[in-house]
Amino acid sequence: MAQIKKILLIILFCFGLNHHANCQFLDTFINEDLEYNSEPSVGPSLENVASINFLLLEAKRHLFTPYRSGGKNPGGFDCSGFVRHCYSSTLGITTPASSFEYNKYGMPVSVEDCRPGDIICFKGSSKRNKRIGHVGIVTEISNNNIFFIHSANRGGIRYDELNAPYYKSRFVGIRRIIP
């Protein structure tokens, strides 16, 4: 019970990071008896909620960092470098160095089962190219829309939404790294 209280304090500390996502987490896995379901399609375990919040806090810390082709550090990121840095620096998880490698990394999840911390994948800029060419980190699911943070060619680290025509037309899928 002490561990649960400690985790809940961490959640409350991070609550200001993303109010909607945290409310969704709390609704998903906490009931009157403080039980949780650790099935990936249902919601994260109590232990993983804090990890996801730390990941999202680290990602937010880099807002407006410039885009840099091949960039892997806070001086400038490309999309996969940004995702890799956030996962590695907060969770010690080494993600692929290149966006196209995400088709074999993690586990695929449906849009309906998507949650913050998942990786959102898009095809490259060529309309004929179907391989993954861009990645970001899901930050929130709200009103049937998925919001994500990523390193964009124009604008650097920023938030965007899947329902935007540019991203909707290039959407490939979602990968789960944190069970």
Image (cartoon, rainbow, N blue to C red):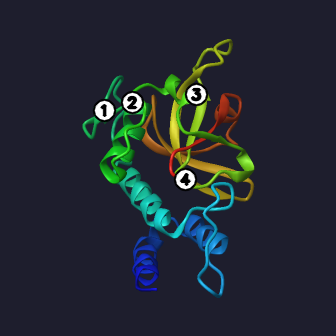
The residue type indicated by label 4 comes to Pro
Dot 2 or dot 3: first in sequence order is 2
Q: Name the residue under label 2.
A: 78
Dot 1 or dot 2: first in sequence order is 1
Q: Mark 4 points at which residue?
A: 179
Above or below, comparing residue 23 to residue 101 in the picture: below
Residue in the picture at 66% in, 74% down: 27
Question: In the rendered view, does 97 fall on the left or right side of 89?
Answer: right
Dot 1 or dot 3: first in sequence order is 1
The residue type indicated by label 2 comes to Asp
Q: Quote the CA–CA distance across marks 1 and 3.
A: 20 Å
Q: Quote the CA–CA distance across marks 2 and 3.
A: 18 Å
Q: Quote the CA–CA distance across marks 2 and 4.
A: 25 Å
Nearest the eye: 6 or 98: 6
Residue in the picture at 36% in, 23% down: 69
Q: Mark 1 points at which residue?
A: 72
The residue type indicated by label 3 comes to Asn
Where is residue 10? Give x, y as percent: 40, 74
